[in-house]
Amino acid sequence: MHARFLSSIAAVLLAQFAAAPALAHHGWGGQGEKQIEVSGKVLRPVRLAGPHASMQIIADGQVWDVTLAPAARTEGAGLTPKSLAVGDPVTVRGNRNNDPK
């Protein structure tokens, strides 16, 4: 009986750990439906850390935090920290976060 109890606990823990990545990931529900385009200059180059790659640009005096695809997909598409240098001109197109900050 003791072994069956331990195997039941192990199964529950395994199921929780297997589900953790799915629970941690978010959808794009916080993004507006309308696509916008912003042209500016790279303020912070592409970062491949975290669940999504990111970068910062400055356009018309406003700093924009840009969330990109997951890091592996971004890098696989050829966008790496060395692809764009600070000051390089860029145009990004995407859906703005519903939170204007």
Image: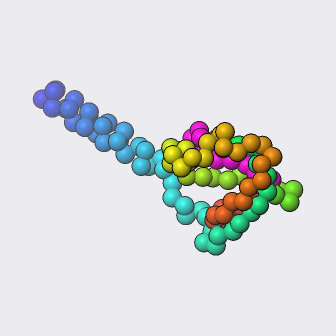
Instruction: Depth check: give the residue in front, 20 or 47.
Output: 47
Residue 38 in the image: state x and y as whole percent.
Answer: 74, 63
Say if the magenta span includes residue 55.
yes
Q: Quadrant of residue 40?
A: bottom right
Q: Quadrant of residue 64?
A: bottom right
For this view, does 51 lie left or right of residue 88?
left
- Residue at x-position 74% and y-position 42%: 85
Report the predominant secondary structure element of the magenta stretch: strand
Q: Where 3 falls versus 63 (above or below)?
A: above
Using the rendered image of the protein, determine whether residue 37 is visible from the camera's viewpoint: yes
Instruction: Depth check: give the residue in front, 62 or 37.
Output: 37
Instruction: Depth check: give the residue in front, 29 or 71.
Output: 71
Residue 30 in the image: state x and y as whole percent.
Answer: 59, 62
For this view, does 4 lie left or right of residue 65?
left
Q: Where 52 falls versus 8 (above or below)?
A: below
- Residue at x-position 77% and y-position 61%: 39
Residue closest to the far top:
2
Quadrant of image for the C terminus: bottom right
Say if the magenta span includes residue 40.
no
Quadrant of image for the N terminus: top left
